[in-house]
Image (spheres, grey):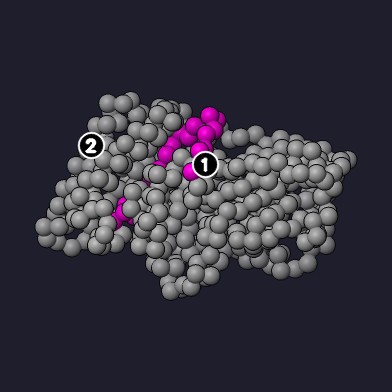
Amino acid sequence: MRVSPFSLRSAILAAALLATPLTAQTVTTDPANHTISPGMLTLPLHIGGRVQAMPLPPPMPKGALLYWHHWPAIYFEGAFIGDRVALKFDDAGDEYRLLIDDKPPIPFFRPGKVEITVVGLGSSAHHARLEKVSESFLGHGAFGGFYIPRNERPLRVKPRRRQIEFIGPSGMVGFGDRSTKIECTFDEMTRTTDAQQAYPALVARHFSADYQVNASSGRGLIRNVKEIRKEPGLIAIHSSIFIDQAVPYFDPKWQPQIIMIAPFADFASELEAGEKWTTQEQLFDDWARSYQAFVLDLHHRSPRAAFLLEWLGDKDISGSGPEVDLFKKKAAAARQAITEMGRRNGIRAIEFVTYDSIGAKLEQSGCAHHDNLKDHRITADWIERIIDAHPGIWDGK
């Protein structure tokens, strides 16, 4: 992991604290699921990301819900006055990180069907945040909420005024960002992906914004990588709660001021026999039309949103010859068409950003040459500078 000296010292300290038995704070696991009783209180949650809530039957407490989720970087926040809090999981595929106040993070890797209790917090006000770290390679995950004893007091966590949404492929997910090698097995990919340390989450937390990372490894807007080539692209699945099921997502309170899209995974591999397009030109024309319509649809859903569109710079298009020249020409035309569409339809801002302006070389030493933790920090700093250059962007200006 490459971080600043100050962050490195903090990481070492946190690791040391996690490795040392805690005297005041204790974590207990109950695989029999008998810890949470009907007399306990269910904490009201503030949720970042898309979930499908299903009632949990008795003997769970009143208001208990199981939150099914699929997209990465989802988080659950609750607050209370008391000494202890219990969590419920039904998830054998995902990794989580629990943050209580400023205490060291508590990791849960594929917890399964279990109830976990943290005690010894002190009888005062506490903020609990459960972060989904992994990408759901193994299917849907489920979190069953926070619970406290009846003699403790639940509090509410207010949603943040700022909202930002990220749409894209593996680079936004943090695919293999904790890996120390490029060649990874499937298990290593799942164990080293950390969406909460990828640049979308870093940027959002920097600006104290709620965020959704509606991203999926290997997916382009209309064309995916070979392993999931027959599955729908991001445009087709974006309006769903789940990546693999058409369960419509609708939340009138989700009105991001910024939407960032990373759109070029469609061109990550050469066309093959049997695909819908026979030439790269056909693919690009279809992609450009679909992309333009997608931005317009997002605008209709979130009329106040400004768009940050990751675009190809000169350094991203290597080589020479007729195909490269055509690609550059098509990219320039698509950019102009999106700009004009935005102007006609009242989109308040469209900013095209290219890695030419990032100001640093990325190592890309994570799994399959993806960004590592240092790269994500560099990218986050770059995007933060771009947003800071538009001070009115959060206020609809």
- 195 lies left or right of 322: right
In the rendered view, would you say 214 is above or below 268?
above
Q: In front: 49, or 53?
A: 53
* Mark 1: amino acid: Val
Pointers 1 and 2 in contact (CB under 8 A)? no
Assess disc 2: are there few (<14), some (14-19) or many (≥20) residues with their C-alpha within 10 Å of its C-alpha: some
Which secondary structure lies at badge 2?
helix
Residue extending farthest to the front is 274
In the rendered view, would you say 162 is above or below 30?
above
Q: Which residue is mark 2?
A: 337
Q: Quadrant of the C terminus?
A: top left
Magenta-colored span:
246-267
Q: In front: 52, or 386?
A: 52
In the rendered view, would you say 396 is above or below 182?
above
The verdict on residue 328 being magenta is: no
* Mark 2: amino acid: Ala
**Residue at the image point whose x is 27% and y is 57% from the top:** 275
Query: Looking at the image, how many numbered discs can be counted on the residues?
Result: 2
Camera sees residue 139: yes
**Residue at the image point whose x is 35% and y is 37% from the top:** 295
Q: Which residue is mark 1?
A: 247
Please provide percent x and percent y for residue 53: 64, 41
Camera sees residue 77: no
- 90 lies left or right of 210: right
Main secondary structure type of the part rendered in magenta: loop
Please provide percent x and percent y for residue 378: 43, 56
Which secondary structure lies at badge 1?
loop
Label 1 and label 2: CA atoms lie apart by: 32 Å
Please provide percent x and percent y for residue 167: 42, 46
Quadrant position of residue 342: top left
**Residue at the image point whose x is 37% and y is 37% from the top:** 307
